[in-house]
Structure formats: C-alpha cells, structure tokens
Image (spheres, grey):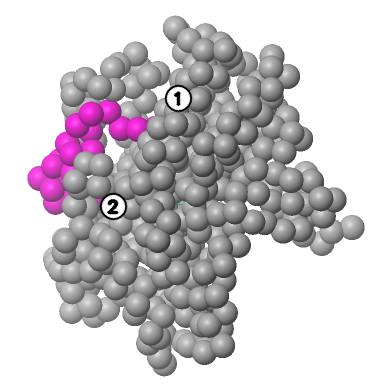
Amino acid sequence: MSHLFYQTSQRRPLLDQARGVYLWDVDGKRYLDGSSGAMVCNIGHSNPNVLDAMRRQMEKSTFGYRLHFETEASEQLAARTAALCPEGMNKVFFVSGGSEAVESAIKLARQHALAVGQGGRWKVISRSPSYHGCTLGALAITGYAPLTEPFAPMMRAMPRVPAPRAYLDGLDPADPATGAHYAAMLEAEILAQGPDSVLAFVVEPVGGASTGALVPPVGYMEAVQEICRRHGVLLILDEVMTGAGRTGRFLALEHWGLSPDIVVLSKGFAAGYVPLGAIVARDDLVAAVLEGGGFLHGFTYAGNPLACAAGTAVIDEIARLDLVQNAETMGAALRKRLDGLAARHPVIGDVRGLGLLMAFEMMADHDSKAPLPAHLNAHQRLVDIAYDMGLIVYSRRTRDGIEGDHIMVCPPLIVGEQHLDEITDTLDAALTRLA
Ligand code: PLP
C-alpha cells in the first residue's frame, strides 16, 4: 500500500533511473522521454556536469535564509539570467516553481501600480484557453474551466480574451489580418474593462499544454505589446514552458523581438534537477516597488543556493551543447515527421509548434475541425498505448466547451534524428492500434 496520493488513484511504475532521453522502471523497462516529463527536462536526465555543480554547492552550503545572507550561487544565476533577457530587464526574483513565479509576477505588477499612484489597476487579463498554474492566484488567471470551476467562488473573476486559435476559426495564421483580429480582441477587452482598471496581460508566447503548442499568428505578439504599452497595461510573458531554449530561442520572446515588463521562468530553467522558478522584471519597475516600501512577498525556499547552482549549470550546459540551435534544427525535423504521420493517419487534424514545443491535434474531421467524441477519450488512450510501448508523450483535452485531443511531443533538447525516428515509429504504431 502506498501512502502517496496524486490527482487520481491511477498508479504508475516505480522509476529506477534516468539517463539522457531515457528512463527505466524497476522492472528494467525503458521509456523514451518524448515530453521531457511535463516539458521540463530540457537538457536530458542525469547530466554529469549539473550533478557535479550541485555536489560542489552541497559541500559549501545548502541553505542560507534570504534575510540573513546573499549567496554567490543566487547572485551568479541572477546575473546569468538577466544577461539572457532583453535590455533593461536586470532584476531577478527566485521561487521554486511555475505557479509561484506567476503569483510573484502578478503581485509585483500590483505593487508597482500602487507605487506609481495607479492603485485603481488590479485586473489581470489572460487568454482562454491558457494555463498559468494551480495555486489560487495563478488559477484565477488560468483559462481552463475544468480546473478553475470548483474553486471559482474562492477567486476574484478576471477577464479573458480568446487564444488566437486561427486553425479552429478558419483563419490563416500567416495573414497579418488574423494576428490583428485577435489582438483587437485584447484592446476591446481593455476598453470594456476601463483601461485605468487593467493591471496586466499575462500570455504564454507559444501556448503550452492548454492549447497544445499554439503558435501566435503573424503580427499578434507585436500588436499585443503595442496595445499594452498604449494603455499602460503591463505585459507579463509566461515563459515557464517556452523558456530555456524550448522553442529554438533561449526565450520565445526573441522570435518577435519583444520587450515585456516581466518574464516568468521555471520548468526548463532548472530542467528538473531541482525545483526552481524566477521572474525577471524591468529595472525601473522593481526600483519603484523597492522605493515604495518593498516587495511584500517571498518564499522560504526562494533563492536556495543548491537550486541556483543547478540553474547556472543548466544554462552552462544549454550553451556548451548548443541546445537552443539543436531545438530549432530538431524541431524542424520533428515537424516533418509529424506531418508524415498526419498524412498516414487522418485522425491527425493539425500539427503545430515551434522548435521542440510541438503538438498534434486529433480530430474527427479535418475540414470542419470537428473534435472526436469525448467518450472515446482518444488522447488518453493514445498516451497509454504509447506508454505501454515505451514512449512517453503528454496530452490534454482542452477545447473549452468543445473537446479537442492534443498530444504534446516535446523531447529533451539533446535529441538526435535517431530519437526522432524512435518517437515517430512508436507513435505510428500507437495510432494504428488506436484506430
Ligand atoms: N505557466 C505555464 C505556462 C505552465 O505550463 C505551467 C505548468 O505547466 C505553470 C505556469 C505552472 O508551473 P508549476 O507546475 O511549476 O507550478
């Protein structure tokens, strides 16, 4: 009998060990990590240089409370992180995960509004569908009803705008009019809410598990930034899943040359070696909050030296192994293979993504984009079949009201062509079994 509990009573095999892109359970069965856990293990498992860096830090110190000590490890990671962010974003605040980071970004934004005499700004607009975390503050801006509804009475309702799912709305994502169309919805919402009451817009630059690697239409992100600036609304980019090289840039914002107010990082930032997250904010924004009395926020484990040493070692490995470039190259190679699968399996209705944040959506009909009936539970069945065959992929059914089955295929950024072949051959067999 196990004393652990998680979301459901379903039990999984006991993990024995993990190396590179593979994991083994205690019975010796091997699994290819086709989703990097939950899009986390960007540099692969058990990287010896990260383990060495962690060991060295553990021999020096494993905890120094932030009210008593700064640590070299946290100073170093803050400097390395800031150097990878747009100019003028040099202020880093550490936490232990994505939800904590999103909460921190929202609270920093609110304190900034108070510090600059704009206390009427408190509404945070986000998109639907979206996922920003499971703590109550992050959940309040998450656009995915099955997760939020039970807790709705406990959270202040926040405004939402539709995620730009051009493929569902029959629009061409390459047409600049499409990006402008969805961005205009944000402006309309800001105007409807009253611009002086809107604090921030929080957005995943490439959608994560909630939209299945949704790439924004041409011009959308740039337009969204311009609209936020014009209305004095802070732009918070949730790069928890897209950061640390996943999309073929260290930060996804580089694809569009964006300069947000706050960037949120976790997942690939410490690549699963330790719990770690961060927010990186504009210098002047943080200065105003500190001058205004300080940031009323902080977690006991924040800036933990072991976590920070691991984070720096992960950034070193991303650079040493040229993983951002590999994500771009292997991402293109993976897309070709998934397009090939789509040609063989009509159930695949859309292939999308950027770099190694890739997904495909299963549908009943390509033209109408009609979803598969919910009772088929196709996404979970496919994941289970693949798992039996030794391939881990990640799924969600998230079409807000309408069901849609997407499968995230997001292996560690260290993958080579041979791993992509193994992934697509297994998916091919799993889709055949599903049919
Ligand atoms: N933001 C995004 C975009 C995510 O994908 C996630 C997790 O999936 C989170 C926030 C929450 O992160 P965590 O699960 O580490 O709290």
Q: In this figure, which residue is indicated by the disc labeled 2?
A: 236
Tell me the element at label 2. strand
Badge number at residue 241 = none
Image quarter in which the C terminus is found: top right
| Residue 234 in view here | no
Determine which quarter of the picture holds residue 186.
Answer: top left
360 relative to 86 in the view: left or right: right
336 vs 43: above or below: above
Task: Tell me the quarter of the image containing the N terminus.
Answer: bottom right
Viewer-nearest residue: 260 or 193: 260
Q: Within the magenta stretch, is there residue 212?
A: yes
Front residue of 127/239: it is 239
Q: Amino acid at mark 2?
A: Ile
Q: Which residues are magenta?
A: 211-236
- Asked if residue 156 is positioned above or below residue 223 in the image, the reply reads below
- Give the residue at x 51% y 82%: 57
Label 2 near ligand 1 (CB < 8 Å)? no
Please name the residue shown 46% across and 87% down the image: 65
Q: Which residue type does callout 1 highlight? A: Lys
Q: Position of residue 206 (x, y in %)?
A: 36, 39
| Label ID, residue 336 | 1
How far apart are the two marked residues, 1 and 2, measured between alpha carbons?
A: 32 Å
Is residue 312 something that shows in the picture?
yes
Image side of residue 41 versus residue 71, left or right? right
Q: Residue furthest right?
A: 1
Q: Is residue 382 magenta?
A: no
